[in-house]
Amino acid sequence: MNTDEQPACIWVDADAAPKAIREILCKAAVRTQVHIWFVANHALPLPKSEWIHSRIVAAGFDVADNSIVQSARPGDLLITQDIPLAAEILDLGIDAINPRGEPYNRETIRQRLNMRDFMETLRSSGIQSGGPTAFDQRDKQSFANSLDRWLAKQVKAKR
């Protein structure tokens, strides 16, 4: 449960969030009455609801990330592909998952950061390392399942 006794909410590093993930999140927010914040440097097409919010930040390096870090509270959930942001959020006691439904955790985040840095070094030296596989139906289902587990944990914490 959120340490300020406010209901937990969901934060989305939305600049790179796939449309399918935004749709799942919006439906879940309305269904479960959980506030969700999409933080991006541009307007996103989102349904109108008292549970769905958009925060547009200035373009720039880590502007959206900083906005999320300053606003999220322990007990909240962050959706992001940004591994350094996930590491920072985990240190604050905030849960995080990526858009493929993979949870970030304190035991593995350093390994993910090291691999990210290694791949960045390869790319900067001209070695083509490819990229992630295309987002597919299995990723969408995995994300929905991870989100449902987090939401169920919130319901249990309220009891």
Image: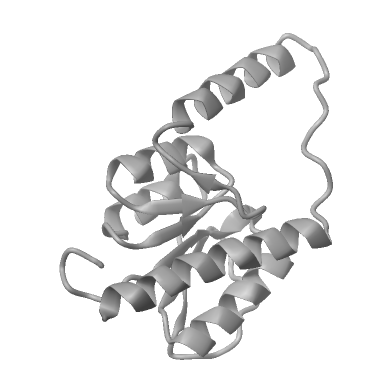
Residue 137 falls left or right of residue 44? right
Q: Quadrant of residue 71?
A: bottom left
Residue closest to the far left: 4
Q: Is residue 55 visible?
A: no
Q: Quadrant of the N terminus?
A: bottom left
Q: In the image, what residue occupies the spot 40% across and 69% down?
A: 153
Whether residue 141 is situated above or below residue 33 in the rendered picture: above
Judge whether 12 appears above or below 31 on screen: above
Q: Residue at x 80, y 13 (%)?
A: 127
Q: What color scheme is it? A: one colour
In x, y percent, where is residue 136? 83, 57
Residue depicted at 36% across the width and 54% down the height: 67
Q: Nearer the viewer, residue 97 or 20?
A: 97
Residue 55 percent coordinates (x, y): 45, 68
Whether residue 3 is visible: yes
Question: Taking 67 as reference, is 59 left or right?
Answer: right
Identify the image quadrant of the C terminus.
Answer: bottom left
Question: Along the line of sight, which residue is nearer the eye, 141 or 54?
Answer: 141
The residue lying at 51 percent from left, 26 percent from top is 113
Q: How many marks can you see?
A: 0
Toward the viewer: 118 or 16? 118
Q: Position of residue 48 (x, y in %)?
A: 55, 90
